[in-house]
Amino acid sequence: MDSQNIWQPIRDYIPQDAAERAAQIAILQAAAADGEDVLLRERTQGHITCSGFVMNPTLDKVLMVYHNIYDSYAWTGGHADGSPAFLETAIREVQEETGIKAPFALMGALLSLDCLPVKAHVRRGVPVAAHMHYNLTYGLIAEEKERLHHKPDENSDVAWIPVSDIAAACREPHMLPIYEKLIQRMRVWKQWQAEAVAQMAMPLLAWYPTHARDLPWRRNCTPYRVWLSEIMLQQTRVETVKEYFTRFLAQFPDVYALAEAPQEAVNKCWEGLGYYSRAANLRRAAQAIVQTYHGEFPRTYEAVRALPGIGDYTAGAICSICYGLPTPAADGNVFRVLARVMDCYCAIDRPLWKRIVMPLLTALYQAHTSDCATLTQALIEVGATVCLPGGNPKCGECPLSLCCLGRLVGDAQQLPKRTPKKPRRTETMTVLLLQCGEKIAVRQRTEPGLLHGLWEFPHIPGECTVQQVQQQVESWGCVPETVHQTGERRHVFTHVEWTMHGMHCQCGAMSTHFVWKTMREIVKELSLPTAFRQFLADL
């Protein structure tokens, strides 16, 4: 990190009283005199410490540890020890001292700057002279349900202390005004976040009519069309969906046509989109609409939400766009926009994030009940075209720039946060292209789960030799005549990656273990997922 940028959070901090102004000056003077040495505890006259002031989501309790040195409950924190990553240091100290695994910054800015005198003491048998802590405090949030533990060598307890009980728990009277200040500021921050969300409506409503993309499902917003588009758009790019949407509507123009269609026909029309359970749920939901609602799409959020394959987001989109109901539609794009507008570091894939933002979004919709359809479309649009993922928001083009706390603080590019993903598991298999004359062996997947109900080429686990393939094909009664390798293919699903080794086998008999189809029949009639379709070129 550039040595000048290390101190930027401190320079940018706006002191709210004389004590903080004095602390800011003292820290910057120390940095000017000794540079990064002020990050080291060996600087005996004073050094940087980082504290996390941790509150629960409702901001009525504070997570505190009982410090043996101070003989009192106090906030968490520790020495920077050379690290210029101040927020990360504060979070690490919270985790080490309390056992909390997933604290997050309510906002990315500094909550407070304080010069805290430390009296002489003995630490782990070593005398420590009196000195100054240049303390940087960050406001953090953690859930009470997380398991707690303390560091026995430094602390004797860790507990959630109700705000009303802090004065009794803290035996350091000089710290009480600081704690009161921090609690008040956390509550002010939370109010700022609510106000930032409340201010989103007017700029979005003014921006959307002249910036909306011309998408086929927006030209006639019937519940059927909106529902179909939203299901297709899950995990799929807009440009890909356009063609599929048009083709699907041509084959299944209404809910009756979809309900009456064989699942294989629906799957075939869906071929290449992936996540085929969506196609199965579309048909199931269409059948429910025909049977229960006589072909009319239900008009309440609860009824729409109860249909197969429809979650909170899709139900919110249908009801707000088609019926004008105040039911927000919040997916990953919208959650990303909100994380930046609120400058909040909660991982947007955590259930807690949804509990935090949905009441704010609902209040926004309820305050603009005549504009619910446009609000939903505008939020989706700004997330898809302006407030982009990957640290690349177009803040200069964003209608929300004036109410965005992330832009104001300078954190927009660092947000949103997500829970680190577990590595995908990998599976290796040998795919067998069994050919007898013009016929090719296929089979339908019957096991529940991945690609259920779709067609596939036979395959066996692992990377097999020609001899192993011959033995397997013989056991099926296909009479192998020639076997040769065709090449390796890969396919990535959400949680698993397949490495597939192709083997072509010319057979002398068509075993009843399989269904035998011509190439034309496979291409025209069967729903063969992309993972296996890529082997068609080897036939």
Image (cartoon, rainbow, N blue to C red):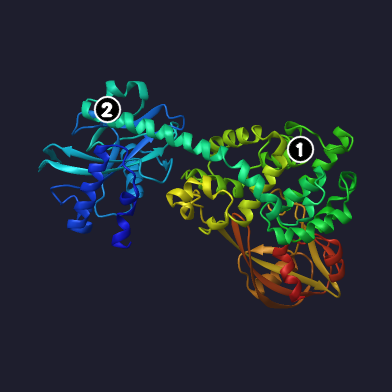
Tell me where residue 442 sits by quadrant: bottom right
Q: Could you give the CA–CA distance between mark 2 and mark 1, rounded to whole angstroms?
A: 53 Å
Which element carries disc 2, helix, strand or loop? helix
Asked if residue 161 is positioned above or below residue 281 in the image, the reply reads above
Element at badge 1? loop
Q: Residues within 10 Å of mark 2 (few under 14, many from 20)?
A: some
Q: Quadrant of the C terminus?
A: bottom right
Q: Is residue 453 left or right of residue 103?
A: right
Looking at the image, residue 168 lies above or below residue 289: above
Q: Is residue 20 left or right of residue 401?
A: left
Residue 400 location in percent, x, y? 56, 48
The quadrant of the rendering that contains the N terminus is bottom left
Percent across and percent down for residue 138 are 35, 42
Determine if residue 101 is in view.
yes
Which residue is found at the position 66% from the left and 47% from the top?
206
Residue drawn 72% across and 61% down? Answer: 240
Q: Nearer the viewer, residue 143 or 22?
A: 22
Residue at mark 1? 307
Q: Could you tell me which residue is drawn at 17 percent across and 47 percent down?
A: 46
Which mark's residue is nearer the viewer, 2 or 1?
Answer: 2
Q: Position of residue 482 (x, y in %)?
A: 75, 79
Q: Decide if residue 397 is on the left or right side of residue 527.
A: left
Q: Position of residue 280 (x, y in %)?
A: 78, 48
Amino acid type of disc 2? Leu
Left-right relation of 67 to 95: left
Viewer-side residue, 412 vs 418 = 412
Q: Which residue is more in the foreground, 479 or 120?
A: 120
Residue under numbered circle 2: 176
Asked whether residue 48 appears in the rendered view, the answer is: no
Locate residue 397: give its quadrant. bottom right
